[in-house]
Image: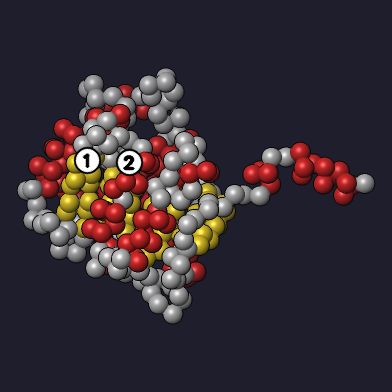
Amino acid sequence: MRIKNLLLLILLVPFNSVFAQLPQVSSGKIHRFENFSSSYVPARTVDVWLPATYNSSKKYAVLYMHDGQMLFDATTTWNKQEWGVDEVITRLIEENKVNDVIVVGVWNGDKQRHPEYFPQKPFETLRQEQKDTIYKAARANGFSVFNDYPINSDNYLKFLVKELKPFIDQQFSTYRDKKHTFIAGSSMGGLISMYALCEYPNVFGGAACLSTHWPGIFSMDGNPIPQAFINYLDKNLPNLRSHKIYFDYGDQTLDALYPPLQHQVDVLMKTKPYSSTNWMTRFFAGQDHSEKSWRSRLDVPLLFLLGK
């Protein structure tokens, strides 16, 4: 009787609640690690994509990507869009344009996404009244930006560097040095990728920051955050000869905020001895703030970071 009741319960529960739905990829394979525990941040899912040519007798570069639930399969995402990471990298591998790589898709912390992706040290340089104003910021729909969680990006990076990376390097056939370790994301994921490169230059050799959300919040009125980020970059950009950094932006929807801010960042970059081999900023006119747009140009940062 208890078995019958259990079977009935399973039938009544939505399928996705019982069996976690793996992303369907066009090429390669997903290895999922659910509820990956951490001493620094709440547990989360980690999806690791291996190319179809993966062979444990070879070594692979590693690309860590934020918002991991948005990378591979539009049927599983909230907005029915995806980055198409598996398709884009597979094409570039088949064209012999990029080095062998695996992708570690780190799911975001849902309501804690913004606090985890918001660079902490630049925030801490603000006056207390500025911090209070930022914390009280709301989205266009009136909901809190930070959802009453403290900024926790330093711990998020510790999770990536001290817990997740050693696990990935143990489980898969990877190069472990910074020359072959990269990090990428969009919007707030672009900010945390920039921050990771600056905070851990001995771990990450390059960062791709797409549609970088320089405002930090969703209004520019009296907003001190962009300047705080630029000041931080000025003091903390890593060694120029051994690191790469990529920025891009569009001009539609939320990306409409970015052109003047990215211009200020580019002015700073031009004062540093970065060259076209280790710094790139690209403008994509007409593109908006969406996975559809990031997918359409993903090959550009991939070639910049991983190109042969």
Q: Quadrant of residue 127?
A: top left
Above or below residue 126? Residue 198 is below
**Would residue 300 appear left or right of 169 to someone viewing this image?**
left
Of residues 105 and 197, the one drawn nearer to the viewer in this rendering: 105
Q: Report the side of 179 relative to 175 (left or right).
A: left
Residue in front for this viewpoint, 22 or 112? 22
* Residue at 52% across, 49% down: 44
The residue at 10%/57% (across/down) is 275
Give the answer, above or below, for where 207 lies relative to 139.
below
In percent of width and height, residue 14 lies at 69, 40
Q: Amino acid at mark 2?
A: Ser
Residue 139 spot, x, y in % from top left: 38, 24
Residue found 43% across the figure and 49% down from its top: 71
Please tell me in which quadrant of the rendered image residue 261 appears.
top left
Q: Which residue is mark 2?
A: 293
Check the image and report above or below for 62 versus 260: below
Residue sticking out furthest to the bottom = 57
Q: Residue at x 32, y 41 (%)?
A: 293
Residue denoted by label 1: 284
Q: Callout 2 environment at 10 Å: few (<14), some (14 to 19), or many (20+)?
A: many
Can you say whether 55 is above or below 307 in the image?
below
Q: Amino acid at mark 1?
A: Phe
Q: Where residue 26 appears, x then y in whole percent? A: 47, 57
Residue 143, percent across and down? 44, 23
| Marks 2 and 1 in Cβ contact (< 8 Å) | yes
Who comes first in sequence, dot 2 or dot 1?
Answer: 1
Q: Is residue 96 left or right of residue 76?
A: left
Disc 1 crowd, CA 10 A, few/some/many (<14, 14-19, 20+): some
- Could you give the CA–CA distance between mark 2 and mark 1, rounded to whole angstroms? 9 Å
Location of the C terminus by quadrant is: bottom left
Asked if residue 111 shows in the view, the reply is yes
